[in-house]
Image (cartoon, rainbow, N blue to C red):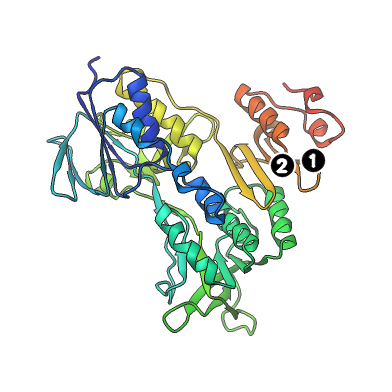
Amino acid sequence: MAHPKRIVIIGAGHASAQLCESLRKGGYGGSITLVGEEAWLPYQRPPLSKAYLLGDFERERLFVKPRTFYDEAGIDLRLGIRAEAIDRAARHVHLSDGTDLPYDALALLTGARVRPLDCPGAGLEGVHYVRGIDDIDGLMPAVERAARAVVVGGGYIGLEAAAVLRKRGLAVTLLHRSPRLLSRVASVDTARFFDALHREEGVDIRLGTTLRAIEGAGRVERVEIERVGVDHLAADSHGEIDADLVVAGIGVLPNQSLAIAAGLMTEDGIAVDETCRTDDPAIFAAGDVAWHPHGRWGDIRLESVQNALDQAKVCAAAMLGEATPYDAIPWFWSDQYDVKLQSAGLPQGYDRAVWRAGDRPRSGSCWLYAAERLLCVEAMNDPRAYMTGKRWIEAGVSPEPEAIADAGTPLKSVPAT
């Protein structure tokens, strides 16, 4: 099968850098053009809400590859330019600078964007989001001036931001509309662990609470909150919190408008097959924007570095005529205070959760099963549990739950079938 002569990549993140590398390592000698809406080289996002916001991570370390990599690999970088339309019949992409890029193969690695707050006052000075370098560069001086912050969202981004703000000395109130933290992304036991952790660190957590309005004379001065599921006429259904900073982390939305306008099939993201190919054989998608089939979890869209890197490799192979279906086990991590969470698998569809105590403070692991089959392990300050559980999930074997629950039984001695 002949390789495409011209490959165009839209989006400049982890997946894009990996796709460039995998194509060149796979022997591809044709032209590669990478178009990125931001002015930055492809960079890592996970450190942004952790070490970078804390000031412990230099900007240059964020970049996935140095500029010399793209120069030496012959990658045509078009940064600070937006892809505005795809002409599938003519096979070219129209860019915001007025140029048209022809392609033989097109990769849509457009990632995701923050879900914006939808309440009065959302546009006031002092309201910030956590997604890109520019977002954090704008947030850092605001943190220096602030004393009281409200974090909206109890997922990983919100919790990581809350941890950094507390370490920076701010009073922090965290609002989460669900009755528990991490309601979409972690087990009940792991959510309970992080709830206790943040309360111990001084975060005022308000569960079942949403943001009704942000108030102030030009900039944030207070927020009005509302309890979820409570009669709005009840005396205790509303309240106010003084604040001079609001940080929102209420999820992301896939950047699929370009694909929709081009008539490609979409769901919660751009629909692709197991080799990252869309319903147009010349167009591929991977990373946070891709809605893909998974042999263990069905059709799904994942927001993780691991998924972006692994799918980029699959995408490169497909472009070069070597079909290698994607079926990697998802894994994630999060840093909060002195706790590192590492998880493998997905906390979906489980009917049994087994807690295993750790061997030091602020440690432990949660093992999730469905009909005695291990689905997921969530390990806090316990890399051995994470690595062992990940290996078992990848091998399709499951440890005995009773033995897992006994912290006195070494993991290497736990029977697994």
Residue at image coords 27%, 49%: 80
Which SS class for mark 1?
A: loop
Quadrant of residue 345 in the image? top right
Residue at image coords 49%, 68%: 142
**In the shown orientation, is residue 140 left or right of residue 218?**
right
Quadrant including the N terminus: top left
Marks 1,2: beta carbons within 8 A: yes
Write down the residue under mark 2: 381
Pick whichever of labels 1 and 2 is earlier in the sequence.
Answer: 1
Residue 275 visible within the image: no
- Residue sitting farthest toward the right: 408
Q: Nearer the viewer, residue 79 or 357?
A: 79
Mark 1 Cα within 10 Å, few/some/many (few <14, many 20+)?
some
Q: Nearer the viewer, residue 320 or 227?
A: 320
Q: Nearer the viewer, residue 279 or 157?
A: 157
Quadrant of residue 282 in the image? top left
Image coords of residue 20 (percent x, y): 34, 30
Amino acid carrying label 2: it is Asn
Write down the residue under mark 1: 358
> CA gap, disc 1 to disc 2?
8 Å
Mark 2 Cα within 10 Å, few/some/many (few <14, many 20+)?
many
Residue at image coords 69%, 59%: 198
Residue 310 visible within the image: yes
Question: From what the image shows, is residue 204 above or below residue 238?
Answer: above
Which SS class for mark 2?
A: loop
Image coords of residue 185 (percent x, y): 58, 48
Amino acid carrying label 1: it is Gly
Residue at image coords 29%, 49%: 37
